[in-house]
Amino acid sequence: MPEEEVIVRATWIDELSGNVQKSVESITSINKGIKETVKTTDTFNKAGVKTVRMLKTVTGGATKLNKSGRLLARQQVLTNRLFTGSAQKLVDNATNINQLGKQYDSLGGAIRMPMERWKKFNKEGGVFNTIGGRMGNRLR
């Protein structure tokens, strides 16, 4: 082999090995970049998991509050139904009886009370507050 050919081949081998070295360096650099990307991704994933946990904690509390609120609203609806029905009528009757008692709460008032009102008053348990009203109720 001529000397020039050996030099050309040696130069070519040097260039080739230089290119191989550059490729190895480039691959090493890419691997470092990939490792950093994986670390960053892991950090974001951990932060995401923490965020999800915090959201579950917050929404869990809100869910409990919503359940309590729904329970209270349901109880209020039931109470309203109770008072719009017979219980409200009882309250109204008691109020009317007390008003009758106040209007006719004397000896003369108890005697003057119309017969229907007097019967209703006594039937529903009305009581006169004054001595005169009680005496008028007994006399009648």
Image: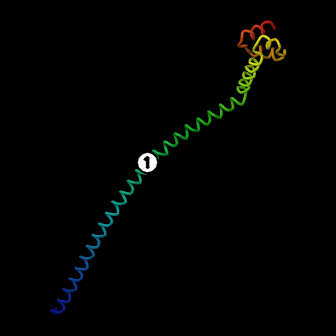
- How many numbered callouts? 1
Q: How is the image coloured?
A: rainbow
Seen in the picture, residue 68 relative to 125 is either above or below; the reply is: below
Which residue position holds label 1?
54
At horizontal 78% and vertical 10% (from top left) the residue drawn is 107
At horizontal 73% and vertical 13% (from top left) the residue drawn is 128
Residue lying farthest left?
A: 3
Q: Secondary structure at mark 1?
A: helix
x then y, percent, for residue 112: 83, 14
Judging depth in this view, the residue of 25 and 72 nearest the camera is 72
At horizontal 55% and vertical 39% (from top left) the residue drawn is 67
Q: Quadrant of the C terminus?
A: top right
- Mark 1: few/some/many CA within 10 Å (<14, 14-19, 20+): few
Judging depth in this view, the residue of 139 and 56 nearest the camera is 139
At horizontal 78% and vertical 9% (from top left) the residue drawn is 136
Q: Quadrant of residue 66?
A: top right
Seen in the picture, residue 78 relative to 129 is either above or below; the reply is: below
x then y, percent, for residue 139: 80, 6
x then y, percent, for residue 116: 84, 17
